[in-house]
Amino acid sequence: MMSKIVIGNQKMYMNKEDVLTFVETLKNTNMDNKQVIVCPTFPFLEYYNGVVPVGAQNVSINDNGAYTGEVSAPQLKSLNIPYCIVGHSERREYNKETDEEINIKVKKLLDQDITPILCIGEKLEERQNKSTETVIKNELNGDLKDLSPEAVKKIIIAYEPIWAIGTGLTPTLEEIDEAMNFIKDYVKTTYNVEKTTILYGGSVSDKNIDELNTVESIDGYLIGGASSKPNAFKYIIDSQN
Ligand code: PGA
């Protein structure tokens, strides 16, 4: 089986000391032939220089100007940041980000040759009333609006059921497999893209990684809580071969 991509979304969990410890652990982790990406908060991006490729956790819808507290895609590019998370459910919920804005962010990133890691996924009540596939479709339609197949091909999609994020709950392996295949088929038929990279995210940890690794349709993981715990994250990297 091919090695899966391991992406850490460190959210706002760590301070400088934690980051330095984490970097040391990564330096002592064999990452040959592994695909590992870490997404720290903006101030800590440079701490990973030469250790692992990094991604930002968000980007502005604007390129330049009087936007206090924002960071633009051209700014990320000027720092050679290769990846950026967009549309995370926490930003959709707390910052009221819309699919329209997420679509702009995806385009801004692609304009700079930065790979978007686009997050989609349903709420618990949406899964319970069997509208998971409708939610996924609506998000993809909005977030990928007006993109060419060449552009869509470059995007990494992370399927993250909102009810699984930070809760210790996960869908069954069959449910994850179903969602992965649904997204792959939908992207293939709608955007004419043969092969898309789809990650699973939501309570991935050192405890459940071995069974998740058995699901062939999962191309990789977006890992929140466990990516701020050096030993758990190392275990997850070591489990890829
Ligand atoms: P979690 O978060 O691993 O803490 O559930 C995943 C994410 O939000 O990307």
Image (spheres, grey):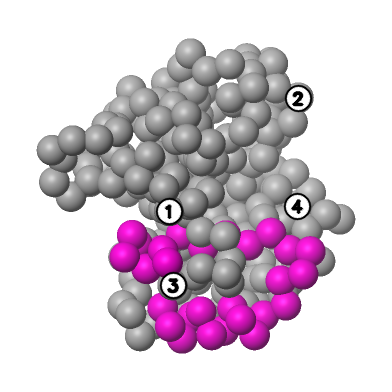
Which residue type does callout 4 highlight? Val
Task: Tell me which numbered mark, 2 or 3, is placed earlier along the sequence.
Answer: 3
Residue type for callout 2: Glu
Residue that mark 3 sits on: 47
Q: Are marks 4 and 2 in contact (CB under 8 Å)?
A: no
Which secondary structure, mark 3?
Answer: helix
Which residues make up the magenta segment? 19-46
Mark 3 surroundings: few (<14), some (14-19) or many (≥20) residues within 10 A:
some
Residue labelled 3 has its Cβ within 8 Å of some atom of ligand 1: no
| Disc 1 element | loop
Q: Who's the residue at 38% across and 40% down the image?
A: 73
Specify which label sits upstream in the sequence, 1 or 2: 1
Please tell me whether residue 84 belongs to the stretch shown in magenta.
no
- Discs 4/2, front: 2
Mark 4 to mark 2: distance in Å?
20 Å
Crowd tier of the residue under label 4, counting other residues whose Cα lies within 10 Å: few below 14, some 14–19, many 20 or above = some
- Checking the image for residue 156, the label placed there is none
Does residue 164 appear in this view? Answer: no
Task: Tell me where residue 127 appears, x and y as whole percent.
Answer: 47, 37
Q: Does the rendering let one see residue 104? A: yes
Disc with the residue nearer the chain's start (4 vs 2): 2
Cα distance in 3D space between marks 2 and 3: 36 Å
Instruction: Give the spatial CA distance, label 1 vs label 4.
Output: 35 Å
Q: Which residue is label 1 attached to?
A: 79
